[in-house]
Structures are given as C-alpha cells and as structure tokens.
Amino acid sequence: MNLAALDDNLARHASHLHHATPGMRLLAEGDVLVCDSGLPDDTFNIVAAARFSTDNRIAETVALLRATGRPFTWWVGPSSTPADLSDRLLAAGLPVAERELAMWCPTGPRPATDREVRVVATPAELADWASVVAANWSPPSPTVLEFFARTAAGSLAADSPARYLIGYADGRPVAAAELFYGAGVAGFYNVCTLAPHRRRGWATELVSFGLGLAATDGYDTAILQAAETAISVYAHLGFEPCGDVVEHAVRPGHRD
C-alpha cells in the first residue's frame, strides 16, 4: 500500500469543494494543505498532507490557522513529515482529538442484496445524504447541512471525484457513505447510519457497494480511516491496517 496515496486522497477529499465555492478557500498549498470553509466548524476546516522540512513551518501554519478565528482539525497521516509530527503538534499545544486506524483493501464486487443503495444523483438525494451525516452529532449539525447545500453544484457535477452513497429503508434515508477518487485510490469517508438502524449491516452494505463501484470505475485499491468500534466491520470486508491517522484540534485565538 502506498501510504502517500492515503494521505493525498484525504487531502484532495478535504479540498475539492473549496476550490469553486464562494466564501471557501485554500490558505496554503505545497508542503501542507490548509482548507478553510469559512464556517465555524472544524469538520470542514482541515489541515492535511504536511510534509515539512523545517521546524518553523509548524509555528507558521498554526499562526495562519488561528488568525482566521475559526477551529481547524489537523490530520497527521502515515506519510506526514517529520515522522514525529504528531508529537510536535502536541508540544505546540494542539491536543489529540481523535486517533483512527488507516486501512486498505482491494476493490471488487461483493454479493448483492435486496437493500436499496444507490449513488446520489439529485439535489433532493444529496439533502437526504447530508441529513444522515448531520445526525452523527447530537443535536444534528446544522453546519453539515449548510456546507452541502452551498456545495451542491460541485458535489453533483458530472466531473466530481466524489460519489455519495445512500441507503434507504422503507423510502427513508438511513445510511450514508462517501467514496472519493484521488491519488490513484478510492477513499471512503463519512460512513454512518442513523441510530435506530445501527447494527443492522448498513455500513457493510454501503462499503461493499462502494468497493464494487470503485472497481467498475477503474480503481483497484480502497482506503479508509476506522474508529476502534468499526475496525472489525471493515476487517470482515478484507481491509487491513496500514498505519494511523491522528487528528489534532486547532482552536482559534489562543494556545491550548
């Protein structure tokens, strides 16, 4: 598994809608990618793919982030440099918000079922998809709904590298996942199920569907970041560990 591809897929996923959406921008590119959605939510304000060669780049980047007055999440992946970047971010006052296992799997078809799973194709379906993702927060996140309403044109564009997968039960949206093509791999993000429908195989269903779709679209490798509670689900589908992804919180305006 090419670990740089995992980090680069994440970075492209984090930034692809910012390019063409008014009010959103990329603050830095090159040895680090900084995506600023303009929204007060670190779900969409992301730092990724840091490959620093000098110590002062951490302080410079943190200063850039805090000057916006908005929270960010700094993702440190398996190919981030320096190799001890996570420790250095901790020393700079950026606490660990989450730690997940990076995993990969060959793509290919999986057994079909009679559940209703499809690729989002209309604004109404995208709104359904966003409502499932927003429900990951309690109460549901209004920022998620706002972000995908503002980026709907880019999300549904014919040349978009993203595929939004949605599952319906009795005509209602109950599960969601995003499949993103970039850096030569297919990345899964935002795999989630509404609380009343969890532990019923929806994550397996959507990821299985995505693995088949990615193979059809010419991608032979899939990657994702798994929370501890989901590792066994993905392992059952053939995913194997390939490193860690650590998220650091960057709070605006002060040292943590």
Image (cartoon, rainbow, N blue to C red):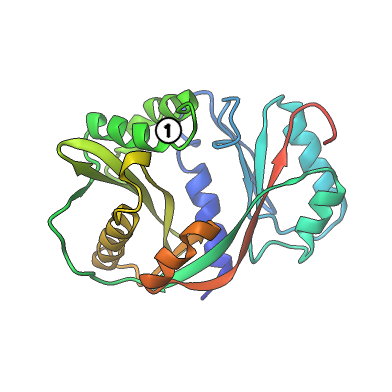
Horizontally, residue 159 falls left or right of residue 87, namely left
**Would residue 231 be seen by someone viewing this image from the given angle?**
yes
Q: Observer-nearest residue: 191 or 212? A: 191
Q: Mark 1: give few (<14), some (14-19) or many (20+) Cα within 10 Å.
A: many
The quarter of the displayed image where residue 65 is located: top right
Provide residue 138's location: percent of width, then percent of height: 49, 30
**Which residue lies at the image location 29% right of the left edge and 63% below the top edge?**
208
Q: Residue furthest left?
A: 114
Give above or below for 61 relative to 6: above
The quarter of the displayed image where residue 235 is located: bottom left
Give above or below for 104 relative to 99: below
Provide residue 127's location: percent of width, then percent of height: 30, 30
**Which residue lies at the image location 39% right of the left edge and 74% below the top edge?**
238
Provide residue 177's location: percent of width, then percent of height: 36, 49
The residue tagged 1 is 134
Quadrant into which the C terminus falls: top right
- Identity, as a three-letter code, of the amino acid under mark 1: Ala
